[in-house]
Amino acid sequence: MSQLTTHILDTCLGKPAEGIEVYLAQKNSGEWNVISKGISNKDGRITDLLSDKVILAPGIYRLQFETGAYFKRLQTTAFYPSVSIEFEISDASHYHVPLLLNPYGYSTYRGS
């Protein structure tokens, strides 16, 4: 399993959010450098964001979810064109960063 995983659930529809583009970036000297990107599948997961062999260096990272395009495809008015979640990697353990999403709000947590 990849060290970093994510899962996007549309809490308004009660199902996974498919087709959301997600960028993973690392913060270096105050600048964000995109290191990977993927698109959520029909289960709301991105299975190839990182290779199973990649271990991220300790530091600050960001997942940016392009939610505006998702809601536009659903012909739904939404407040957030994108959602950015910043988090810290401190060791080689598994990090799961889910996004619970609806047109006017979102939440996240460190999952397992």
Image (spheres, rainbow, N blue to C red):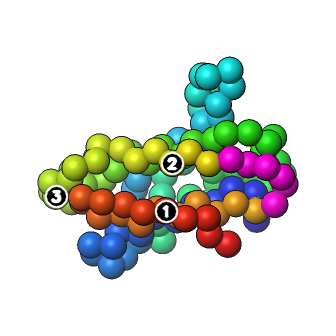
List the residue tagged with mark 1: 108
Residue 42 x %, y % = 44, 68
The mark nearer the N terminus, 1 or 2, is 2
What's the magenta region? 88-93
Kind of residue indicated by mark 1:
Thr
List the residue tagged with mark 2: 85
Kind of residue indicated by mark 3:
Thr
Q: Nearer the viewer, residue 80 or 41?
A: 80
Residue in the image at 20% along x and 53% along y: 78
In 3D space, how far apart are the residues under numbered discs 3 and 2 (Cα atoms)? 22 Å
List the residue tagged with mark 3: 76
Residue in the image at 68% along x and 47% along y: 88
Residue 48 x %, y % = 64, 54
Residue 70 x %, y % = 30, 53
Query: Do tag 1 and tag 2 residues touch (Cβ < 8 Å)?
Result: yes
Kindly state the secondary structure of the residue where label 3 is placed: loop
